[in-house]
Amino acid sequence: MTADPQASTVNPPGGVGLSGLREAAQGCRGCELWEPATQAVFGAGPETARIVFVGEQPGDQEDLRGEPFVGPAGRLLDRALADSGIDRGDAYVTNAVKHFRFRPTPKRRLHVSPGAEHIAACRPWLDAELALLAPEIVVCLGAVAAKALIAPSFRITKDRGRLLPRPSALGDEEAGVQQSWLMATTHPSAILRTPDEERAAAYDALVADLRVAASALA
Ligand code: URA
């Protein structure tokens, strides 16, 4: 699938809050991914969240349920958040791309990574979420989010777990945020794909990174 050059970019409306954005995102035709997907999966969590997690795109279960990180990767994320002392109820969880990109097969829908055009088309929605939330820290889960939000050259293996100053963003001043941070760590799905004998160490490394993220909130 390639981006549809005829697709209209829908700009997120202003002044509507997160629930208004969530509703408006259902009408987004900024790229062609909306068509085969069940629905747009917008971020979830309280408007007061001080920490935001950004994944890649919804998976099969997220597409069906309309909520981010509720499938196997979400369950691993929940466990890692609990082990690092972060309450998921206090966090906002979202994705760089709001529609599930997949290849249908007779048995199941296979995940296909979003292209640069999908990430760019969806970016106004992510920016609108971040501007409303004005979080103290944004944690990128995996390379897609890290390359979009930190730098295209960002390497998870090399640069993970480090707190990087986040350029001041729209909404920060109003929310009284003096300094906000960016950080990237492994995507929970990558841990699920790690060979058995290395999975416990990969999980521990994720929890260690999340503890660093939690320390930025102290
Ligand atoms: N993987 C993601 O990046 N996001 C989800 O919501 C689920 C799986």
Image (cartoon, rainbow, N blue to C red):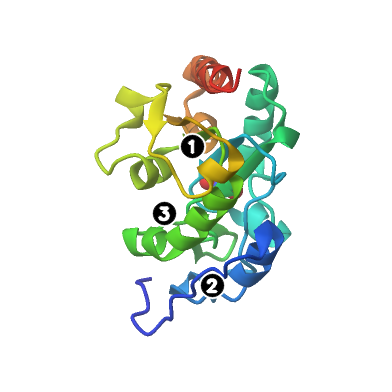
Q: Is residue 143 above or below residue 206?
A: below
Give the foreground label among 1 and 3.
1
Q: Quadrant of residue 7?
A: bottom left
Q: Residue at x 52, y 42 (%)?
A: 172
Q: Residues within 10 Å of mark 3 (few under 14, many from 20)?
A: some
Query: Mark 1 belongs to which amino acid?
Result: Leu
Horizontal and vertical percent position of residue 61: 67, 53
| Mark 3, residue position | 113
SS class of the residue under badge 1? strand
Q: Residue at x 48, y 54 (%)?
A: 127
Of label 3 and label 2, which has the lower sequence position?
2
Q: In the image, which disc is placed on residue 91?
A: none
Horizontal and vertical percent position of residue 211: 56, 17
Q: Is residue 19 left or right of residue 214?
A: right
Q: Residues within 10 Å of mark 2 (few under 14, many from 20)?
A: some
Q: Is mark 1 within 8 Å of ligand 1?
A: yes
Marks 1 and 3, how far apart in space?
Answer: 14 Å
Query: Mark 2 belongs to which amino acid?
Result: Trp
Query: Mark 3 belongs to which amino acid?
Result: Ser
Q: In the image, which disc is placed on residue 34?
A: 2
Image quadrant holding the C terminus, namely: top right
SS class of the residue under badge 2? helix
